[in-house]
Amino acid sequence: MNAALAGGRPDSRAVRSAPPLEPKSHLDAALLSGTVTNTQLTLVQIDNYGPWTVTPEPRREMDLQTLQSRLFADIAQFVGYRGGYAFFTRFDNMVAVTNGLDTDDHELLQESMGNRYPVTVSLGIGVDPNPAVALEQATEGLQRAGSAQDGDRREVLVGDPITDGSDDVSIAHFDVNDATGKYTDQLNEFDSFIQIEQGYAALMRHLREEQGGLSFFVGGDNIIAVAPEMSTDAYQGAIDHVEEAVGVDLKVGVGRGASAHEAGMAAKHALEECRHRGTAVERGDVTADGA
Amino acid sequence: MNAALAGGRPDSRAVRSAPPLEPKSHLDAALLSGTVTNTQLTLVQIDNYGPWTVTPEPRREMDLQTLQSRLFADIAQFVGYRGGYAFFTRFDNMVAVTNGLDTDDHELLQESMGNRYPVTVSLGIGVDPNPAVALEQATEGLQRAGSAQDGDRREVLVGDPITDGSDDVSIAHFDVNDATGKYTDQLNEFDSFIQIEQGYAALMRHLREEQGGLSFFVGGDNIIAVAPEMSTDAYQGAIDHVEEAVGVDLKVGVGRGASAHEAGMAAKHALEECRHRGTAVERGDVTADGA
Amino acid sequence: MNAALAGGRPDSRAVRSAPPLEPKSHLDAALLSGTVTNTQLTLVQIDNYGPWTVTPEPRREMDLQTLQSRLFADIAQFVGYRGGYAFFTRFDNMVAVTNGLDTDDHELLQESMGNRYPVTVSLGIGVDPNPAVALEQATEGLQRAGSAQDGDRREVLVGDPITDGSDDVSIAHFDVNDATGKYTDQLNEFDSFIQIEQGYAALMRHLREEQGGLSFFVGGDNIIAVAPEMSTDAYQGAIDHVEEAVGVDLKVGVGRGASAHEAGMAAKHALEECRHRGTAVERGDVTADGA
Amino acid sequence: MNAALAGGRPDSRAVRSAPPLEPKSHLDAALLSGTVTNTQLTLVQIDNYGPWTVTPEPRREMDLQTLQSRLFADIAQFVGYRGGYAFFTRFDNMVAVTNGLDTDDHELLQESMGNRYPVTVSLGIGVDPNPAVALEQATEGLQRAGSAQDGDRREVLVGDPITDGSDDVSIAHFDVNDATGKYTDQLNEFDSFIQIEQGYAALMRHLREEQGGLSFFVGGDNIIAVAPEMSTDAYQGAIDHVEEAVGVDLKVGVGRGASAHEAGMAAKHALEECRHRGTAVERGDVTADGA
C-alpha cells in the first residue's frame, strides 16, 4: 500500500469523508502483488474548465450540459472502440479504464478533442492491481503538472501505460432488483432517483473503503465497478451492506477479461444469469462474443 | 426515518420509498397557493429502455453511454433554446423545467427523438408551485399510461402545460467552496468525487424533504435546484445542514424569472456575487442579459 | 434582361462566375412585389475557418469532417425546430431558410455555437421574394463587415428579419426517378454519385439562372430548392432541361407555407403523389400535419 | 482491367455519363500491377433508407439532415481514428478509405451504428491499386446481396480487407486558388458555391474517367481524391482540364502513406508548399507528424 493513501492526510475532514485505502484481510498478498488483475486508469481532466464556464460571463447552462455530455460521449466512443470503459464521473473530470490503450492512443484522443471542442483535456495514466491506487497515480501525475484551474497547464499527458498486454481487468455490473416495479412505476421520478442515488452512495463508499474498487453510476439502476480481485463473499458483503444501510437490494455480475469491454460483457452476461436464477452474485468468464 | 417522511402516505410501499411531501411551517399559505412561483416540469422517460439494452444480447456499454448522453444533450439543447433546463437524472428518466414550452413543443421533441434514435420517449407534464408536487403529477401521468417497461406503451404525452405565461420559476445554483483547492488538486479523482457526491446526496434529500425542492448534480462541483419560494434563511439552513452532515461547504446563488434560463442566469450571477463578496447566499434579479 | 444571363455568357470569367440576377419575363410584377412569397435566408459563415484548419499545422481531416458535419447538424436542428431549413452547402458557408426566426433567434444560435465549438459563426440575413436576391443581401451584409478570412471579424450579425409573419415561402423537393434501380443497384457507388451530381449541377444552374431559385443536394437522390413563385410549366421546363442536358430524370413536389418546414412537408407529400400517379410535377397545399 | 468496367455496359446513357475506366498511356504497367499503391475502399450503405424516410409519413427534413450528418460524423471519427478517411458522398451511401481496418473493425462499426441509430448499415469492402476498381468490387459485393431498398437485406458485410499491411495509399488534396478573394468575398454564397461545384464536377469526372481516381468534395474549396499512382504531369493535366472546362483554378498536394491519414497529411503539407511557393502541384512524403 501506498503511504500517501494509507494515512498522512493532514486534513481530518478529508480523511473522514474520503477514507484511506486499507489492506483487507480477505485480500491476500498475491492479489496485491498484481499477478492477477492489473487495472490501467486514465483521468481525463478538462483544462481550466470552471473559469471558462464563467468567462467573460456565465455561459448558458444548457450549452454547458450539451458540451459536457457530448464530450463524454466522444470519449466513451473512442475508449470503447479500443475495449475500454469511460465514466462521466463529474464531467469535468472523467475516469476511464484504458487497458489496451497505449500512449499514441492517448495522444490521438487529446489531439482530436482539441480539434473539435472549445476546451482541451489533460490525461493522467496510472496502473495498479488496485483501482484506487491506479487512480491515485493518474491523479497525482496531473496534480504535479499544475492545478486543474491553472490557465497555463494545457494538454498534459503523463503516466505510463501497460506495455505487456497479458494482464486482466475485473468489472462488476450491479443493478437494483425490480427497480421498475418498486420505484419507477411507483414513486415520482425524483424519489426513485433518491433511492438509486442512496444505493449508489452506499456502494461507492463501501467498495472504495473496503476494497479500493471504484463504482460509477451509469444510468437507470446500473452501477459499474472497476474492481480488484474480490471473492464472491466480498461481493455478497457489499450487497448486504447496501441493503442494511439504505434498504436498496442489489445484485451483481462479475467478469474478468483482457479489456474492460471483455470483462464488462462477461459481467453483463453474469448479471443476466442472476436474473434467470434469482441469485445475487454470479461470475462470468469471457464469452465468445465478449471480445 | 424522518417523521414527516414516514407518515401520511397510505400505501406502505410508497411510504417507505417515496417520502411524502409535507407543508413546512416556514412556507406560508401564499407560497403554496401558487401566486408567486409556478414550476412546470416534464418527465422524459425512454420507453422500455432496460429490456432494449439487453435484447437480444447485452449491448456494448460504451454504445449505451454514448446513446444516453447524446440523447440527453439533444433534449438539453431543445429545452434550453426555449428557456428551459433539462437534467440527466438517471438518463433513462430525465427531468426538465419546461415553463414556456407548450404541448406542440413537447410533440415536436417527441417526434424528433423518434426520428433520430433507436428508442422513443414518453413525456409527462406537471405544474405546481412546489416542484416535487409538479413532478409527482408528471410521473403519475406516465404511470397511469402503463409501466416504463411495458413494450406497448410508446410515445405517451400527458399533462397540461401552463397556458398563462405570467408565472415565475425559481432556480438555485450551488457550488462547493474551493473545490479545486480542497479536492481536485489534493485527492485522487474518485475521492474528490465522493466528497461532491456526499454533498449532493445530503442536499438533495434535505431540499426534497424540507421544501419539495429538486436538486440535480450538473457536473464539476455544481448542483442546480428547482426550488419553491424559499427564504434566505432556508437556503442558509440547507447549507448548514450539508456542512454538518458531511462536511462539504456550499454557497448558493438564487434567481427568479419567467423561465428556468432567466432564473438560472440570475442565479449564476448571484453565485458570482457570493464569490466576490465571500457570502454564502445571494439572490439575483433577472438581468438584462438573462433573457 | 441582361444579355449575359439570358444566354451566351460572353465574358469569360467574371460574368461566368458571378451571374447577375435579372428579372425574368415570366415572373410578373406581382411576384416581385412580395405579395405572394417572401423568402428570408440566412448565410451562416464560419469565421476565418480556412486559416484555422491549418494553424499551427494542418488538422486531422476526419476531425474537420466531424466538426463540420456536427456543426451543420446543430444548425439544422436549431433552425428546423423553428420551422426553417438549413443546407450544408460548402459547410464553412451554409444557407438557411429562416422565415419565422427573428433577431433574437439568430443571436441565440450564434451564442450557442460559440459556447460549444472551437470556431464562431457570423450570420447575414436577407429577405426578398426572389431567393437569389435574398441571399445576395445576406451575403453582402457579411462582406461589408469584412472578409471571411479576416481574423478580427467575428460573430457578425447583420440584416433584418421579416417582422410581419404573413408571407409564404415556396419549397420544391426533387428526386431522381428510380435512382436505386437505375444507379445504386447497378453502378459502382461513385458512378451512381456522378449521375446524381450531374443532375444536381444541371438543375442548380438552371434554376439559379432562369428563376433565382436555389437548389441544394440533401443526400441520396434528393434535391431541395428554395424557389420563387414558379408555374408548373416552369418546373416541367427545369425537369426537361436536366433530362436533355445530362440524361437524369427528375420529378418534383412543390409546396407553399408560412415556413420552410410547412412548405417542405407539402412538397414531400406532393412528391409522394408524383410517385403514386407517375407524374413529374405535383403541387401541394399545407396539410394538417405539415405544421 | 475489369471487363465490366472497360466497356460492356449495356445502357448507353450510363456509359455516357459514367464512362468506363480506360488504361492511360501515362500509367505504366508497374502502376497497374498493384505493386506500388493498393487502396482498400469500403462502401457504407444505409439499409433501405429511402423507404424509411417516408414511412409511415415523410419525416421532418431537418431530422433527416441531422441524422445523416451525425451518422457520417461518427463514421468519420471511427475510420479516422484508425487512419482512414470517410467521405459523405450521398450520405445514404458513403465511401471510406479503410487501409489498415480489418474485418473485426468493420463488424464493430456496424454493431455500434446499429446500437445507436434507428437505421442499420451494410458494408462492402474492395481492394485494388485502382480506386475505381476497388469501389466496383465493394459495390458489387453489396449488390449481389440484394437491393439497397430490400427491406430484408440488413447489416451485410462482404469483401476481404488487405491482410498484409505493406501497401500504400495515395491521396491528393486540391483546393481553389484564392477562393475567398475571388468568390466568397465577392459573390453571393450560392454563386460562389456554383463555381466550386463546377470545379468539383469537372475534376471528379476527369479523374474518374482518365485515371480511376475518386474525388470527393470535403467542404470549403477543398476536394480530396483517392488516387492511383499518377505522375506530376497527370496532376497538372487534371488542373489544366478544370481550368479550361470551367475556369476554376486549382492546385494540389499529393501524398503517399500506409494509411489515408498518413497520405492525406503529407498531401496537406504539400498543399501548404504550393501556397508558399506559388506552385500548382507538390508531392509530399510522410512526415514525422503525419502518423
Image: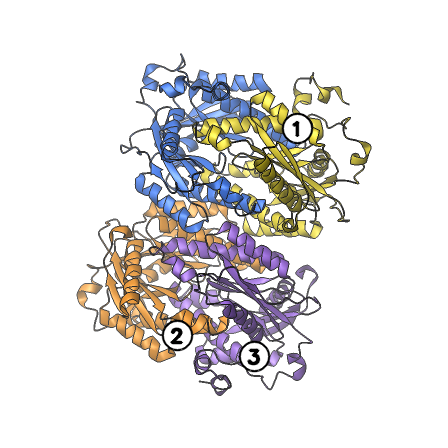
Chain colours: A orange, B purple, C yellow, D blue
Q: Where is residue A170 in the image (x, y as percent from the top left)?
A: 27, 60
| Amino acid residing under circle 2 | Ser
Q: Residue A17 carries which label?
A: 2
Task: Name which quarter of the figure residue A272 lies in.
Answer: bottom left
Residue, x 48% and y 87% (percent of image)?
A: B3
Residue pushed farthest top? D25
The local secondary structure at tag 3 comes to helix
User: Does residue B197 appear left or right of residue C232 in this picture?
Assistant: left
- Image marks 1 and 3: residues in contact by CB distance under 8 Å: no
User: What quarter of the picture does the N terminus of chain B occupy?
Assistant: bottom left
Image mark 3: chain: B
Which mark lies nearer to you, 1 or 2? Answer: 1
Residue A8 visible in the shown view: no
User: How busy is the neighbourhood of tag 1: few (under 14 within 10 Å), some, or many (20 plus)?
Assistant: some
Viewer-side residue, B21 vs A88: B21
Residue kind at label 1, given as amino acid type: Gln
Name the residue at 67% across, 30% down. Answer: C235
Question: What residue type is disc 3 on?
Answer: Gln
Q: Is residue B248 above or below residue D171?
A: below
- Residue D50 visible in the displayed image: yes
Tag 1 and tag 2, C-beta contact below 8 Å: no
What residue is pinned by disc 1?
Answer: C236
Tell which tag, 1 or 3, sits nearer the viewer.
1
Q: Which residue in the structure is indicated by mark 3?
A: B211
Vertical placement of residue A1 versus C119, above or below? below
Q: In which quarter of the image is residue C273?
A: top right
